[in-house]
Every structure is written in C-alpha cells, then in structure tokens.
Image (cartoon, grey):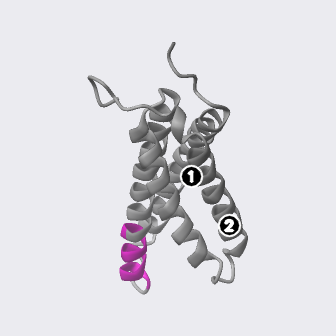
Amino acid sequence: MPRQRGWAVTAAAILSFIFGAIGIVGGTIVMLSSIIFASFMATPIIGDVAGIAFWITALIGIILLGSTVLNIIAGYLLWRRRRSGGYLTIILAAIQLVTSIVMLFLPGLWVGGIIGVATSVILIVFVAVGWSSLGQAAYYPW
C-alpha cells in the first residue's frame, strides 16, 4: 500500500501555492511600478536617479517572480510527495527567514519581518513533521 501524504505535507504544499500566488501578484506590481520611474527619466534634474531606480525596481520584481515560481514548483513537488519538494521548500524558507530577520531591523518593514519569520518557521516545521511521508523519485525527478 502506498504511503499517504500527511497533513503537514499537504499544509506545506498549500501554503507554498498560496505564497506563490501572492508573489506573482506582488512581483507583477513591483515590475509595473518600475514604469513610474521610467517616466521621470527625461526630467533633467532627477533623470539619472530615476533611471537607476527603474533598473533596481525591475530587478527586484524579476527576483521576486523567480522565487515565486520556485515556491509553486516546491508546492507541486510536495503535493506529489517528492522529497525534492521538501528540500526546495526548506531552502526557500531558510532564505526567506534570513531576509525576514533583516527586515525586523528596518523601521518600516518590521511587521513584514515578523510575518516572514513566522511563515518560514511554520513551513520548515510542517516539512520536518511530514518528512517521513515524502518519498524518493523512482524513475523521474518530478
């Protein structure tokens, strides 16, 4: 009889899908907001600064969209009970944890830091609790 997907793995997969969906919306908004900076590039005084801000904002949006795609892939792999999804989820949650800890010390971002730390720890705990229900891929990596 095949192993069942545990409640913790199911919860981690659903959370990964939710974070992926939120990240797609957030990354798209960040990418679109870079257009605002591009509109100021023709202004004589702040044109150079706006150009730098455009590229930085666009780069942040691309990074956010990339990590979001990885979150969705991790959720799919967890849903399919693949151990590679557990590894990917733990790696992504650890990166988010470090980033969120840094955010705790920034004046306007500390609330996001608290939420990020909490969600990262929850994901890591869920994957750790359900680790035994994750199997190796026998013939294919997905």
Q: On the picture, is 103 further left or further right than 65?
A: right
Q: Which mark is residue 112?
A: 2
Residue 60 in view of the camera: yes
Would you place residue 16 above or below residue 40 in this image?
Answer: above
> At 30% across and 31% down in the image, what residue appears?
141
Would you place residue 20 above or below residue 78 in this image?
Answer: below
Q: Which mark is residue 34?
A: none
Q: Nearer the viewer, residue 85 or 62?
A: 85
What's the amino acid at mark 2? Gly
x and y, in percent, of residue 50 in the image: 42, 76
Q: Nearer the viewer, residue 109 or 131?
A: 131
Quarter of the picture containing the C terminus is top left
What's the amino acid at mark 1? Gly
Q: Nearer the viewer, residue 128 or 29?
A: 128
Helix, strand or loop for disc 2: helix
Image-quadrant location for residue 53: bottom left
> At 41% across and 81% down in the image, what residue appears?
49
Q: Which residues are magenta?
A: 46-55
x and y, in percent, of residue 97 in the image: 56, 66
Q: Residues within 10 Å of mark 1 (few under 14, many from 20)?
A: some
Q: Residue furthest left?
A: 139
Q: What residue sits right under mark 1 in the picture?
A: 26
What separation in Å lies between label 1 and label 2 (alpha carbons)?
Answer: 13 Å
As for residue 107 lying within the magenta part, the answer is: no
